[in-house]
Protein backbone atom coordinates (compact mmCIF):
# COMPACT_ATOMS: atom_id res chain seq x y z
CA UNK A 1 0.00 0.00 0.00
CA UNK A 2 1.45 3.39 -0.98
CA UNK A 3 0.49 6.27 1.31
CA UNK A 4 1.02 10.01 1.33
CA UNK A 5 2.08 10.60 4.91
CA UNK A 6 2.69 13.70 6.98
CA UNK A 7 3.71 14.45 10.54
CA UNK A 8 2.69 17.99 11.44
CA UNK A 9 4.95 19.27 14.21
CA UNK A 10 5.03 22.64 15.94
CA UNK A 11 8.07 23.82 13.97
CA UNK A 12 8.48 21.32 11.11
CA UNK A 13 6.18 19.33 8.85
CA UNK A 14 7.63 15.99 7.81
CA UNK A 15 6.19 14.77 4.53
CA UNK A 16 6.73 11.45 2.87
CA UNK A 17 5.59 8.73 0.51
CA UNK A 18 5.61 5.39 2.35
CA UNK A 19 5.10 1.78 1.33
CA UNK A 20 5.50 -1.53 3.19
CA UNK A 21 6.90 0.14 6.30
CA UNK A 22 9.51 2.08 4.34
CA UNK A 23 9.78 5.75 3.47
CA UNK A 24 10.27 5.89 -0.32
CA UNK A 25 10.86 9.65 -0.34
CA UNK A 26 10.59 12.40 2.23
CA UNK A 27 11.09 16.09 2.78
CA UNK A 28 10.67 18.68 5.52
CA UNK A 29 8.98 22.07 5.42
CA UNK A 30 8.59 24.76 8.09
CA UNK A 31 5.16 24.33 9.68
CA UNK A 32 4.43 27.95 10.65
CA UNK A 33 2.05 26.41 13.18
CA UNK A 34 1.38 29.77 14.84
CA UNK A 35 -0.08 31.01 11.54
CA UNK A 36 -2.37 28.01 11.17
CA UNK A 37 -2.83 24.93 9.03
CA UNK A 38 -4.99 26.32 6.21
CA UNK A 39 -2.00 28.20 4.76
CA UNK A 40 0.21 25.13 5.15
CA UNK A 41 -2.02 22.72 3.23
CA UNK A 42 -0.95 23.96 -0.23
CA UNK A 43 2.68 23.48 0.89
CA UNK A 44 1.86 19.92 1.94
CA UNK A 45 0.18 19.22 -1.39
CA UNK A 46 3.06 20.68 -3.44
CA UNK A 47 5.63 18.68 -1.46
CA UNK A 48 3.76 15.40 -1.97
CA UNK A 49 3.36 16.07 -5.72
CA UNK A 50 7.10 16.78 -5.93
CA UNK A 51 7.97 13.57 -4.06
CA UNK A 52 5.57 11.54 -6.24
CA UNK A 53 7.21 13.10 -9.34
CA UNK A 54 10.66 12.10 -8.09
CA UNK A 55 9.42 8.54 -7.62
CA UNK A 56 7.68 8.44 -10.99
CA UNK A 57 4.34 7.81 -9.25
CA UNK A 58 0.96 9.50 -9.44
CA UNK A 59 -1.50 10.06 -6.61
CA UNK A 60 -3.82 7.48 -8.25
CA UNK A 61 -1.22 4.88 -7.27
CA UNK A 62 -1.74 5.82 -3.59
CA UNK A 63 -4.25 4.20 -1.24
CA UNK A 64 -4.71 7.24 0.98
CA UNK A 65 -3.34 10.03 3.13
CA UNK A 66 -2.19 9.79 6.73
CA UNK A 67 -1.78 12.71 9.11
CA UNK A 68 0.02 12.65 12.47
CA UNK A 69 -1.23 15.69 14.36
CA UNK A 70 -0.13 17.28 17.69
CA UNK A 71 -3.52 17.22 19.41
CA UNK A 72 -6.35 14.99 20.55
CA UNK A 73 -8.26 13.59 17.57
CA UNK A 74 -11.78 12.22 17.21
CA UNK A 75 -10.76 9.25 15.08
CA UNK A 76 -14.22 8.26 13.73
CA UNK A 77 -14.86 11.75 12.33
CA UNK A 78 -11.23 12.70 11.64
CA UNK A 79 -11.69 16.03 13.46
CA UNK A 80 -9.13 17.78 15.66
CA UNK A 81 -10.59 18.13 19.18
CA UNK A 82 -8.35 20.67 20.91
CA UNK A 83 -5.72 23.32 20.32
CA UNK A 84 -2.35 23.52 22.08
CA UNK A 85 -0.86 26.69 20.62
CA UNK A 86 -0.25 25.03 17.26
CA UNK A 87 -2.47 25.14 14.15
CA UNK A 88 -5.24 27.01 15.97
CA UNK A 89 -7.50 26.77 12.91
CA UNK A 90 -7.31 22.98 12.61
CA UNK A 91 -10.49 22.37 14.61
CA UNK A 92 -12.43 24.30 11.95
CA UNK A 93 -10.89 22.43 9.01
CA UNK A 94 -12.36 19.36 7.33
CA UNK A 95 -9.15 17.58 6.40
CA UNK A 96 -10.96 14.57 4.96
CA UNK A 97 -12.80 16.85 2.54
CA UNK A 98 -9.46 18.44 1.64
CA UNK A 99 -7.90 15.04 0.89
CA UNK A 100 -10.87 14.09 -1.27
CA UNK A 101 -10.86 17.39 -3.13
CA UNK A 102 -7.12 17.68 -3.77
CA UNK A 103 -6.16 14.02 -4.27
CA UNK A 104 -9.42 12.02 -4.37
CA UNK A 105 -8.01 9.92 -1.53
CA UNK A 106 -9.30 8.88 1.92
CA UNK A 107 -7.53 10.62 4.81
CA UNK A 108 -6.81 9.12 8.23
CA UNK A 109 -5.62 11.28 11.13
CA UNK A 110 -4.31 10.41 14.59
CA UNK A 111 -2.44 11.95 17.50
CA UNK A 112 1.28 12.24 16.67
CA UNK A 113 2.61 10.34 19.71
CA UNK A 114 0.17 7.52 19.02
CA UNK A 115 1.31 7.46 15.38
CA UNK A 116 4.96 7.25 16.45
CA UNK A 117 4.10 4.25 18.63
CA UNK A 118 2.09 2.57 15.86
CA UNK A 119 5.11 2.97 13.55
CA UNK A 120 7.49 1.48 16.12
CA UNK A 121 5.00 -1.28 16.99
CA UNK A 122 4.55 -2.40 13.39
CA UNK A 123 7.99 -1.67 11.92
CA UNK A 124 10.46 -0.66 14.64
CA UNK A 125 11.48 -1.23 18.26
CA UNK A 126 8.10 -2.72 19.26
CA UNK A 127 7.95 -5.32 16.47
CA UNK A 128 6.70 -8.70 17.63
CA UNK A 129 5.10 -7.46 20.88
CA UNK A 130 1.45 -6.66 21.53
CA UNK A 131 2.09 -4.73 24.75
CA UNK A 132 4.19 -1.65 24.15
CA UNK A 133 4.22 1.91 25.47
CA UNK A 134 6.20 4.84 24.17
CA UNK A 135 7.36 8.15 25.55
CA UNK A 136 8.61 10.89 23.23
CA UNK A 137 10.97 13.42 24.81
CA UNK A 138 10.91 16.75 22.99
CA UNK A 139 9.23 20.14 23.11
CA UNK A 140 6.51 18.34 25.07
CA UNK A 141 6.38 14.80 26.43
CA UNK A 142 4.21 12.56 24.25
CA UNK A 143 3.11 9.10 25.28
CA UNK A 144 0.98 6.30 23.82
CA UNK A 145 0.06 2.71 24.58
CA UNK A 146 -0.67 -0.44 22.57
CA UNK A 147 -2.01 -3.07 24.95
CA UNK A 148 -3.20 -6.60 24.06
CA UNK A 149 -2.60 -5.71 20.43
CA UNK A 150 -4.98 -2.74 20.53
CA UNK A 151 -4.15 0.93 20.21
CA UNK A 152 -5.54 2.48 23.39
CA UNK A 153 -7.79 5.43 22.63
CA UNK A 154 -10.55 5.68 25.23
CA UNK A 155 -13.91 7.40 24.96
CA UNK A 156 -12.47 10.83 24.06
CA UNK A 157 -9.20 9.86 22.36
CA UNK A 158 -7.25 10.61 25.56
CA UNK A 159 -6.24 7.13 26.71
CA UNK A 160 -2.49 6.65 26.77
CA UNK A 161 -1.54 9.98 25.26
CA UNK A 162 -1.66 12.12 28.41
CA UNK A 163 1.24 10.39 30.18
CA UNK A 164 3.26 13.60 29.88
CA UNK A 165 0.56 15.14 32.05
CA UNK A 166 0.70 12.51 34.75
CA UNK A 167 1.77 14.06 38.03
CA UNK A 168 5.38 13.40 38.95
CA UNK A 169 5.61 16.12 41.62
CA UNK A 170 2.71 16.71 44.02
CA UNK A 171 1.98 20.44 44.20
CA UNK A 172 4.60 21.14 41.53
CA UNK A 173 4.86 23.65 38.71
CA UNK A 174 1.69 24.76 36.91
CA UNK A 175 1.44 23.03 33.52
CA UNK A 176 -0.20 24.34 30.34
CA UNK A 177 -2.82 21.56 30.72
CA UNK A 178 -4.17 22.92 34.02
CA UNK A 179 -2.61 20.27 36.25
CA UNK A 180 0.26 20.79 38.71
CA UNK A 181 3.59 18.95 38.69
CA UNK A 182 3.13 17.24 35.30
CA UNK A 183 6.13 15.38 33.87
CA UNK A 184 6.01 17.77 30.91
CA UNK A 185 6.13 20.84 33.19
CA UNK A 186 9.14 19.38 35.02
CA UNK A 187 11.29 18.10 32.15
CA UNK A 188 10.51 19.09 28.57
CA UNK A 189 12.09 21.57 26.19
CA UNK A 190 9.01 23.83 26.47
CA UNK A 191 9.56 24.23 30.22
CA UNK A 192 13.37 23.94 30.33
CA UNK A 193 14.07 27.68 30.69
CA UNK A 194 11.52 28.01 33.48
CA UNK A 195 12.87 25.00 35.39
CA UNK A 196 16.49 26.15 34.89
CA UNK A 197 15.87 29.75 36.00
CA UNK A 198 14.43 28.48 39.32
CA UNK A 199 17.71 26.72 40.24
CA UNK A 200 19.90 28.51 42.81
CA UNK A 201 23.07 28.19 40.65
CA UNK A 202 21.39 29.49 37.51
CA UNK A 203 22.97 32.96 37.31
CA UNK A 204 26.52 31.59 37.55
CA UNK A 205 25.88 28.75 35.07
CA UNK A 206 27.41 28.60 31.58
CA UNK A 207 23.88 27.72 30.42
CA UNK A 208 22.57 31.20 31.39
CA UNK A 209 24.92 32.76 28.81
CA UNK A 210 23.67 30.70 25.86
CA UNK A 211 21.36 32.36 23.31
CA UNK A 212 18.99 29.36 23.39
CA UNK A 213 18.74 26.73 26.06
CA UNK A 214 18.11 23.15 24.98
CA UNK A 215 18.78 19.67 26.29
CA UNK A 216 21.80 19.13 24.03
CA UNK A 217 23.44 22.07 25.83
CA UNK A 218 22.35 20.78 29.24
CA UNK A 219 23.94 17.34 28.65
CA UNK A 220 27.07 18.92 27.15
CA UNK A 221 27.58 21.34 30.04
CA UNK A 222 26.75 18.67 32.62
CA UNK A 223 29.56 16.53 31.18
CA UNK A 224 31.84 19.57 31.34
CA UNK A 225 31.14 19.92 35.08
CA UNK A 226 28.64 22.80 35.25
CA UNK A 227 26.76 22.25 38.57
CA UNK A 228 23.50 23.80 37.33
CA UNK A 229 23.54 21.65 34.17
CA UNK A 230 24.25 18.58 36.30
CA UNK A 231 21.27 19.38 38.54
CA UNK A 232 19.03 19.89 35.51
CA UNK A 233 20.22 16.63 33.96
CA UNK A 234 19.69 14.68 37.18
CA UNK A 235 16.23 16.21 37.72
CA UNK A 236 15.15 15.50 34.13
CA UNK A 237 16.42 11.91 34.20
CA UNK A 238 14.43 11.30 37.38
CA UNK A 239 11.29 12.83 35.85
CA UNK A 240 11.55 10.69 32.71
CA UNK A 241 12.32 7.61 34.80
CA UNK A 242 9.32 8.31 37.05
CA UNK A 243 7.16 8.73 33.96
CA UNK A 244 8.38 5.36 32.64
CA UNK A 245 7.40 3.70 35.93
CA UNK A 246 4.01 5.44 35.84
CA UNK A 247 3.40 4.13 32.31
CA UNK A 248 4.47 0.61 33.33
CA UNK A 249 2.17 0.66 36.37
CA UNK A 250 -0.74 2.08 34.35
CA UNK A 251 -0.55 -0.14 31.26
CA UNK A 252 1.46 -3.33 31.97
CA UNK A 253 3.67 -3.29 28.85
CA UNK A 254 6.65 -5.53 28.17
CA UNK A 255 8.53 -2.83 26.26
CA UNK A 256 8.95 0.92 26.89
CA UNK A 257 10.21 2.72 23.79
CA UNK A 258 11.80 6.15 24.24
CA UNK A 259 12.00 8.51 21.28
CA UNK A 260 12.04 12.22 20.48
CA UNK A 261 14.75 14.79 19.76
CA UNK A 262 16.16 14.77 23.31
CA UNK A 263 17.08 11.11 22.74
CA UNK A 264 20.08 12.37 20.77
CA UNK A 265 21.55 11.92 24.28
CA UNK A 266 20.34 8.31 24.53
CA UNK A 267 23.75 7.27 25.90
CA UNK A 268 22.92 9.19 29.10
CA UNK A 269 19.13 8.73 29.18
CA UNK A 270 18.70 5.00 28.49
CA UNK A 271 21.02 3.66 31.23
CA UNK A 272 19.46 6.03 33.78
CA UNK A 273 15.86 5.10 32.95
CA UNK A 274 16.72 1.38 32.77
CA UNK A 275 18.38 1.49 36.19
CA UNK A 276 15.48 3.37 37.81
CA UNK A 277 12.86 1.11 36.21
CA UNK A 278 14.69 -2.05 37.28
CA UNK A 279 14.77 -0.76 40.86
CA UNK A 280 11.33 0.83 41.17
CA UNK A 281 8.80 -0.64 38.70
CA UNK A 282 6.61 -3.30 40.30
CA UNK A 283 6.82 -6.14 37.78
CA UNK A 284 6.99 -9.43 39.67
CA UNK A 285 6.71 -11.34 36.37
CA UNK A 286 10.12 -10.10 35.15
CA UNK A 287 11.78 -7.04 33.61
CA UNK A 288 10.31 -4.49 31.24
CA UNK A 289 12.65 -3.77 28.32
CA UNK A 290 13.47 -0.07 27.98
CA UNK A 291 14.70 0.62 24.45
CA UNK A 292 15.38 3.52 22.10
CA UNK A 293 13.13 4.26 19.15
CA UNK A 294 14.44 2.57 15.99
CA UNK A 295 12.65 4.70 13.44
CA UNK A 296 13.14 8.18 14.90
CA UNK A 297 11.48 10.87 12.84
CA UNK A 298 9.97 8.45 10.36
CA UNK A 299 7.93 6.38 12.87
CA UNK A 300 4.82 8.55 12.57
CA UNK A 301 5.07 8.45 8.76
CA UNK A 302 5.31 4.68 8.35
CA UNK A 303 2.33 4.27 10.73
CA UNK A 304 0.11 5.64 7.96
CA UNK A 305 -0.46 2.30 6.24
CA UNK A 306 -1.74 0.66 9.43
CA UNK A 307 -3.98 3.62 10.26
CA UNK A 308 -5.56 3.73 6.81
CA UNK A 309 -6.10 -0.04 6.88
CA UNK A 310 -7.81 0.29 10.27
CA UNK A 311 -10.01 3.27 9.40
CA UNK A 312 -10.84 2.37 5.81
CA UNK A 313 -10.87 -1.44 5.72
CA UNK A 314 -11.20 -2.92 2.25
ZN1 LIG B 1 0.20 18.99 32.16
Image (tube, helix red, strand yellow):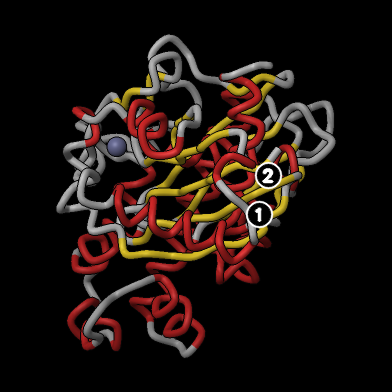
Q: Residue at x 74, y 38 (%)?
A: 122
Please indicate whether residue 52 sits to the left or right of residue 76 in the image: right
Mark 1 crowd level (few <14, some 14–19, many ≥20, 10 Å Cα): many
Quarter of the picture containing the N terminus is: top right
Q: Residue 37, position in %: x, y?
A: 24, 45
Identify the disc placed on residue 293. Answer: 1
Identify the disc placed on residue 199. Answer: none
Which of the 4 image quadrants contains residue 164?
A: top left
As displayed, is residue 145 above or below residue 42?
above
Mark nearer the N terminus (1 vs 2): 2
Q: Residue 191, position in %: x, y?
A: 26, 57
Q: Residue at x 38, y 67 (%)?
A: 232
Quarter of the picture containing the C terminus is: top right
As displayed, is residue 89 above or below residue 155?
below
Identify the disc placed on residue 120. Answer: 2
Mark 2 residue element? helix
Please indicate whether residue 230 sits to the left or right of residue 39 in the image: right
Mark 1 residue element? loop
Q: How many marks?
A: 2
Q: Residue 276, position in %: x, y?
A: 63, 50
Q: Residue at x 17, y 40 (%)?
A: 88
Q: Residue 260, position in %: x, y?
A: 51, 57
- Asked whether the beta carbons under mark 1 and mark 2 sit within 8 Å of each other, the answer is yes
Please indicate whether residue 175 sits to the left or right of residue 3 in the image: left
Q: Nearer the viewer, residue 17 or 141?
A: 17
Question: Mark 1 and mark 2: span between their CA atoms?
Answer: 7 Å
Which of the 4 image quadrants contains residue 212?
A: bottom left
Which of the 4 image quadrants contains residue 168?
A: top left
- Does residue 173 appear anywhere in the picture? no
Amino acid sequence: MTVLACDLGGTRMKLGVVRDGRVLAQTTEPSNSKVGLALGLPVVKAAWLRLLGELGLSSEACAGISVAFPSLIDVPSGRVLAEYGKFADAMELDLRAWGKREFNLPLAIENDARMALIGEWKHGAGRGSDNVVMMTLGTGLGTAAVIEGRVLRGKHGQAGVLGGHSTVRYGGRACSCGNLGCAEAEASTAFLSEVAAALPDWNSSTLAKLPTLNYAAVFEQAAAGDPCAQQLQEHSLRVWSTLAVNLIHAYDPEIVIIGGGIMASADVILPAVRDYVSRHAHTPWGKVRVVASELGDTAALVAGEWLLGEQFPK
